[in-house]
Amino acid sequence: MKMARKLVYVETYGCQMNVGDTEIILSILRDNGYDRTEVMEEADLILANTCSIRDNAEQRIHGRIARFAQEKRRGTADGTAPLVGIVGCMAERLKDKLLESGVVDLVVGPDAYRSLPGLLAAVRPDNPQMDVQLSRDETYADIRPVRTDRLGVSAFISIMRGCNNVCSYCVVPYTRGAERSRDAHSIVREAREVFEAGYKEVTLLGQNVDSYLWKSADETVNFAELLRRVAAIDPLLRVRFATSHPKDISDEVIETMASMPNICRHIHLPVQSGSTRMLELMRRKYSREWYLERVARIREVLGEDCGLTTDVIAGFCTETEQDHADTLSLMEEVGFDWAFMFQYSERPGTLAQRHYPDDIPPEVKTRRLEEIIALQNRKSLERYRAQIGKVHEVLVEGPSKKNPAEICGRASNSMMCVFPGSHPAGTYVRVRVVDCTSATLICEEI
Ligand code: 5AD
Ligand code: SF4
């Protein structure tokens, strides 16, 4: 007799790693009787794959749990109440505290997804289940993720898990555990499979890809070598990666990028602050000068047009007006294409929370962040304007959201391009840039 299949609905928050993890979870669940639905109301199982990076990320998820509670109450009357599971970073951070509301049936941390089927078999309304064990070696290397992107153009491939840095503000080492690199052969195999399935782009993901290092009895593969192997699959497969760490990005990686045109000309290099004093307090293990030297090297080898993006935190512990001014001047000097910009949010259990006062008043954090954003908007426009007249090869993603007569896709440097046309998703089109905004290149096909 065939078992009736059930439906799982998943919401994913946070970073691209989490998107990748959702695809792993869906694969494990699919092999255990669950198909995916995008309609929460019809689900037998509701999952939130959560993020703890800033307090507001967690607050948002608490709001969603309240919404899931409604769904449960609605179903209780007719016996269709779904199970509710919290997985990912917030599950790892809050553990059994999440069970207190009585809404949550399952709490599963980032290294425990293989135990989902067992937990689901054991769970009862009055008997919630939890596994938040972190692992030294879990990389889910053998699991074929269920792709969740709609376009079928670009796939995320996780190459490592966890993080061994101890940036003093960051909760990730606590929620995702120690760093471990995935078997290089399984990565190359997965990239080849997605290319054969029609994908044209892979993004290799890790908290700190530059420290990727996989050893077997007869070989050692570092990140540069991994990039070479993935890029060698086919010249028509674009390779991207995230995230790089300024202390670890090596000349070998930069030169590997230069040597293979299908490795995209874009580096996301979070700087966090332009003040060496702040960087020390953040335990980033580089100085302002080191960062600027890495940028100079990238531009020397890959050219001025290499896409460069960053993350910045405003108002970290003890930050003075001079430290803030240093951040602004660094951003002025480098000229990032765009940036993710945040106010510092104190996270329980981190080094900063234990040792430094969160002493910058909220209104000062807000004002500094606004200054950072205003400066970045101006720099973005400058960087995009500098592209006018240049030629790019765009990988088409689909129709433009604003105008259905136009299509959009990214240039190698990651800038979004729009232009009139009707090529299907996954085609490469050569375009010339004719105009721009601070976030889009307006192009024409050539
Ligand atoms: N507060 C604010 N921003 C943070 N980030 C990480 N931790 C915090 C925090 N506690 C930012 C960093 C990181 C990005 C993913 O999130 O800029 O690079
Ligand atoms: Fe959020 Fe960081 Fe976890 Fe990603 S790794 S989900 S950004 S806390």
Image (cartoon, rainbow, N blue to C red):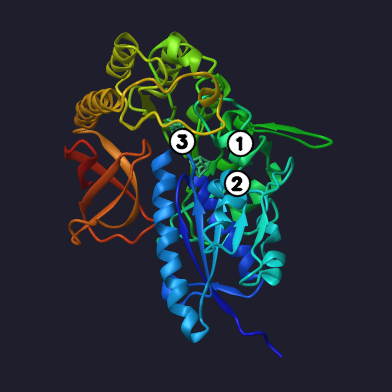
Relative placement, left or right, of 218 versus 405 is right
User: In this view of the protein, can residue 234 be seen by the observer?
Assistant: no
Relative placement, left or right, of 114 versus 415 is right
Name the foreground residue: 125 vs 193.
125
Q: Which residue is mark 2?
A: 92
Look at the numbered disc 2 and give the secondary structure of its residue. Answer: helix
Asked if labels 2 and 1 touch by Cβ distance under 8 angstroms, the answer is yes
Q: Is residue 381 above or below residue 49?
A: above
Whether disc 1's CB lies below 8 Å from ligand 2 is answered no
Quadrant location of residue 365?
top left
Q: Which residue is mark 3?
A: 261
Measuring from the top left, give residue 385's x and y in whole percent: 19, 30
Badge 2, how many Cα within 10 Å: few under 14, some, many 20+?
A: many
Q: Earlier in the sequence, mark 1 or mark 3?
A: 1
Relative placement, left or right, of 130 versus 388 is right
Residue visible at 55% across and 26% down in the picture = 253
**The residue under label 1 is which amino acid type?**
Tyr
Residue visible at 43% across and 77% down in the picture = 74
**The residue under label 2 is which amino acid type?**
Glu
